[in-house]
Amino acid sequence: MSEEKIKHTEPEEHITDHDYDGIKELDNPPPRWIMLLFYITIGWAIIYAAYFFWLKEGDHQDAEYARKSEKHDQKYQIASLSADDLVAFTDEASLAEGKQIYTDMACMACHGLNGEGNAVGPNLTDTHWIHGCDIQSVFNVIKNGVPAKGMTAFKGQISDDKIQKVASYVLSLKGSNPANAKEPQGVECNN
Amino acid sequence: MENQKFYYDNKIVKLFILATLVWGVVGILVGILAAAQLAFPVFNFGLEYTTFGRVRPLHTNAIIFAFVGNAIFAGVYYSMQKLLKTRMFSDKLSKIHFWGWQLIIVLAAVTLLAGITTSKEYAELEWPIDILITIIWVVFGWNMIGTLIVRRVQHIYAAIWWYLATFLGVAILHVVNSFELPISLFKSYSIYAGAQDAVVQWWYGHNAVAFFLTTPFLGLMYYYLPKAANRPIYSYKLSIIHFWSLIFLYMWAGPHHLLYQALPEWAQALGVTFSIMLIAPSWGGMINGLLTLRGAWDKVRDSAALKFLAVGVTAYGMSTFEGPMMSLKNVNQITHFTDWTIAHVHIGGMGWNGGLVFGMLYWLVPKLFKSKLFSEKLANIHFWMSTLAILLYAIPLYWAAVTQWLMWQEYTPEGLLAYPNFLETLTQIVPMYTVRVFAGLLFLGGFVIMVFNLAKTMKAGSFVNDEASEAPALVLAGKRNPVTETLHRWMERRAVRFSILTFIALAIGGAVEIIPMIFIKSNVPTLESVKPYTPLELEGRDIYVAEGCYVCHSQMVRPFRWETDRYGEYSKIGEFVYDHPFQWGSRRTGPDLARAGVIGGPMYKNAVWHFNHFMDPQKMNEESIMPNYAWLAVKDVDVTQTPKKIRAMQTLGVPYEEGYDEKAVDELMAQAQTISDDLKASGIELAPQKQMIALIAYLHKLGRDIMSENAAVTEEQGETAEQQAKEITLLDTPEDLEAGKKLFQANCVVCHGAEGKGIPPAFPSLVDDEWIKGNTPTDVFHSIAEGNVTKGMVPYKNMLSEKQITQLASYVLITLQEQNKQN
């Protein structure tokens, strides 16, 4: 009796030779929306691949990291500097502060108490520099580090104006001839 | 045509059902234990066999392979015979299959708790068990295909297609992922390394979900749902389309477990796009199930079996929408490494797999025992308990995931991490873990009610081992008539051809991803500075694997600023080339360790710290939920295996010099001696051959190589320049002291202990009368602000404001001193 009732509400045809342990199958087409969804996702996949690989529009993750990281730095550059402001301090107060930062951030662990260098890091007091000797270069090395060589990036730890001060301090060490100075590394550089 | 008489083998079905019930209780209990361990670490019991790192893999294996596995076989053995109108091909094979599978489960339980593991998730079992699984799986397939051959039905029904795909899919996955080089009966190394191992493992891991938790269940759905509802399948055409599209597409989606990780972009993109394309094929199964219930919803109201089936299918639909969304890279950065994934799999496991198994059992057991279900009411109670348990499980964990993720990436206005201490982000969500324990108990309660209900049903009924039936013999139809018979319909009566085509559809995705990863060099760029592990580090690594450290600690810094600020430089593909197996992990219950060896990096801890932390993590940090590992200071490294391990690594392509195996033990002891000496300098006696020494050596190797040349901090004992001291007045209001307490717990307890007693002699007590740098408020303020870099005391003035440091000093000098006096 319930069979009868169902037949009324159900115009679809049973497929005649489909009977598996009493299970019948209907000849309905798949609902249109599910097929549409399928085609849309395939289309999306093609566009995604095209965007990142053929058109090369989308950033790969290294580039994305660099871009977002830069944005991050800009966002938090409250005390940060424009290129024009990036000059080496020579006044005593700033250099004393720079020296304090040098101590606080444990720079001496790799560069020695007085910048003489040690087994790990280069001498900061001679005229030879590996990554440049102007304030911009030194600032940049401290800020972004040289990860491959073990120089830590300090941008997440101290603000730009502190980096500027410690960089100024480092530059002020030139010619101070500390004891146990490490042999020169890099190229001769004067400014 | 004359009918042939034959007997269905119901006994094998009954055996698998009983095993399902037993292992179900065990699996859920172990899950509750694991959940309790995360809420209350005391449940680790201080024993090496019951730490979370070993219990959690036991839970996943017990649920997937023991509970769900036996349920699949019960459902398949019953429905296959009915659908093919024949007894199973061989009773002997059925029996070997059953007992072999139970043996595997028991071996799994014993070995996993003993710390014998490959560490590849859901494939943790060691090589002898892998071989046993292969044999038993072949027995299952042989029995299945034999049954197909002796069938009395012209066409094979959709449920059988899914069973076939299950057999073939799991066979491919298991064999390819289990290539490993044995060292001993209990230890092997994956032949794949690093990123390659990761691709193979997650191709496996993702498709274990597909071909163990999805395809067999779709097969079960196609049989038990229309049977229980007594309704025809809604659309035969949809069956065809979603079958082929699903099995083909699934195999490509594995890399979505490795997004933003050290994997080539093309492989990640395949993971993303194929996951999105899987939505419609997955939903095809859901809607074919739900539409089959059209006109039968009144029955759903009255039948617990149908309720479970309907909710199960709905949970499947939710999971298979959520999964692809989690595969989008921007969503994945939230869901990966957090509890989101855990919630996701439990919607699938408890909702879809649980729902189908319970629905099937409530229908099948009365049928087999020729009786009515003992109590429909109890079954309904089980249904509501189970549904509530799923919600109670998932919602807190989603909450926890988002909370923790937000905390991980929050910055202060100065641009520093708001929660630099990882533990703060965990402590915040531990209450959610307590809720989860109750969810588990509720689910178990419902399950036990079901066991009782079914046992009563069995007792009241009468069971026939061999159920008589009859059907005419099969006369194979001849050539295809292209007018009356579609191509697919023709294939449905050519079972072998159907299987071959299924195999091809399955093999393509894996081949396209794995082969280039292994053979095309540019996919894994080498890094000059990355060096193989020393023998001691290698032994330490094996301990790391055995203890299941990867269960809670990832080794994969993703290229997000909030990860690189917290952990250090993001991980590069070339860093992992000597990692057999890879240890990237999938959940960060503890902090990432990829850069734990970078001296001067944010994750570095010295040997003394590690020693104290392993001995008693809670002493160093009250709120830590890490189990203690004190036995590592008792047990020795088995150096007799070391040369063998070195030779195995050479076989796998690790460039140790010729004959290094003979020097390995000497080098191991020499390196161990330096760590032992280092500890001794701080007054800790730990013999060099102890396992903890090897583990510390391994941790100190992690992530260090590409940050090279800063290998050693020099022992510069610099006099820090005297600062002009500024007078400090303590802040003694309750609010300030409370704030000081919070700061102390977040920053100081790791070294100085919750009560400020320190860990002498490395970390001084703050509550005795001896002060290295004086105990005036100004002195203490200074010690905190300036730190003592050479001794390991961090200068906090860049992280905390002057007021905060004053609050901290006040807490130390007022509250801690008072507490100490009271005791």
Image (cartoon, helix red, strand yellow):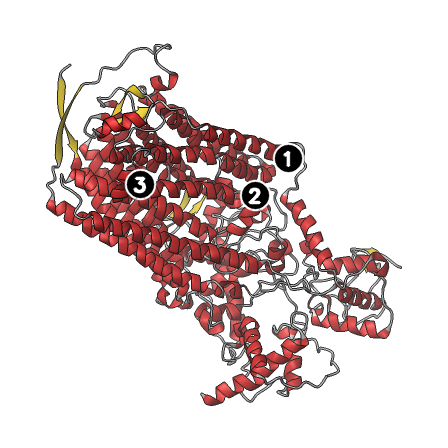
Which residue does the image show at 28% across and 43% down from the upper left? B301
Q: Position of residue B248 (x, y in %)?
A: 44, 30
| Residue B494 as seen in the image, left or right of residue B652 | left
Which residue does the image show at 46% across and 39% down from the upper left? B203
> Subunit of mark 1?
A
Q: Position of residue B184 (x, y in %)?
A: 37, 49
> What residue is pinned by disc 1?
A51
| Type of amino acid at the residue the image marks with label 1 | Tyr
Mark 3 burial class by Cα count in 10 Å: few <14, some 14-19, many 20+? many
| Type of amino acid at the residue the image marks with label 2 | Leu
Visible in this render: residue A135?
yes
Q: State the SS at label 2.
A: loop
Mark 2 burial class by Cα count in 10 Å: few <14, some 14-19, many 20+? many
Q: State the SS at label 3.
A: helix
| Residue A65 as seen in the image, left or right of residue B503 | right
> What residue is pinned by disc 3?
B309
Extreme residue toward the right, this view: A191
Foreground of the two, B234 or B145: B234
> What residue is pinned by disc 2?
B263
| Type of amino acid at the residue the image marks with label 3 | Leu
Foreground of the two, B152 or B764: B152
> Subunit of mark 2?
B
Q: State the SS at label 1.
A: helix
Which residue does the image show at 61% across and 79% down from the upper left? B807
Tell which tag, 3 or 1, sits nearer the viewer.
Answer: 3
Tell which tag, 1 or 2, sits nearer the viewer.
Answer: 1
Which residue does the image show at 18% across and 33% down from the upper left? B91
Tell me, yes or no, whether the two marked residues, 1 and 2, touch with CB atoms within 8 Å.
Answer: no
